[in-house]
Amino acid sequence: MQNNKKDIETKFQNKIQKYCAIEERCEFDVKKKLSQWGVTENFSRSIITDLIKNKFLDEERFAKMFCEVKFRTRKWGRIKIIHELKRKYISEINIHNGLTVINKSDYIETLKESLQKKSESIKEIHPLKKKQKIVNFLLQRGFESNLIWDYIDIYK
């Protein structure tokens, strides 16, 4: 009986290690996956401790990768990135460290590009309505309102 339990534990550990090796994961994602697999809370904590010890899980590394990917591929702003990291229970210090991978000039350039593309795609003729649509779009993308207003008048 004890040997069978050990085999099951080893199976779950190997399975979750593969899950973490595929892409960066955070503790929240791993806990959620283990729960879906029906792993008990105590065993789940043991697995997570082991994953951290063996460098399969690293919240700071996850935050940096998350920020980089969401900014580069999805063109998200800092506010949306922060919000999503908080939803995954990433600590404030790791969120701050993660955001350091976003270059300030690249960030402004991405904001300008998003602003210009949206401006060109909107068919609205009334200038104030068009401006409001652009602002709403960029706010949904997670860009800071003060930055949006700093650059909005460039692309009328």
Image: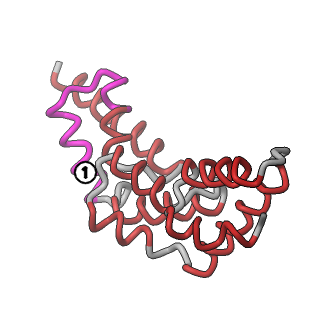
The residue depicted at 70 percent of the width and 53 percent of the height is 128
Q: How is the image coloured?
A: secondary structure
The percent position of residue 112, horizontal first and vertical second, equals 70, 69
Count of numbered circles on the image = 1
Front residue of 8/75: it is 75
Give above or below for 117 relative to 136: below
Front residue of 30/1: it is 30
- The outermost residue toward the top is 1
The percent position of residue 154, horizontal first and vertical second, equals 74, 72
Q: Which residue is mark 1?
A: 50
Front residue of 17/142: it is 142
Characterize the magenta stretch by its predominant secondary structure: helix
The residue depicted at 20 percent of the width and 26 percent of the height is 40
The percent position of residue 54, horizontal first and vertical second, equals 31, 59
The residue depicted at 27 percent of the width and 26 percent of the height is 39
The percent position of residue 6, horizontal first and vertical second, equals 23, 31
Quarter location, residue 43: top left
> Within 10 Å of the Cα at label 1, are there few (<14), some (14-19), or many (20+) other Cα atoms?
some
Find the magenta span and give its range.
33-53
Quarter location, residue 56: bottom left
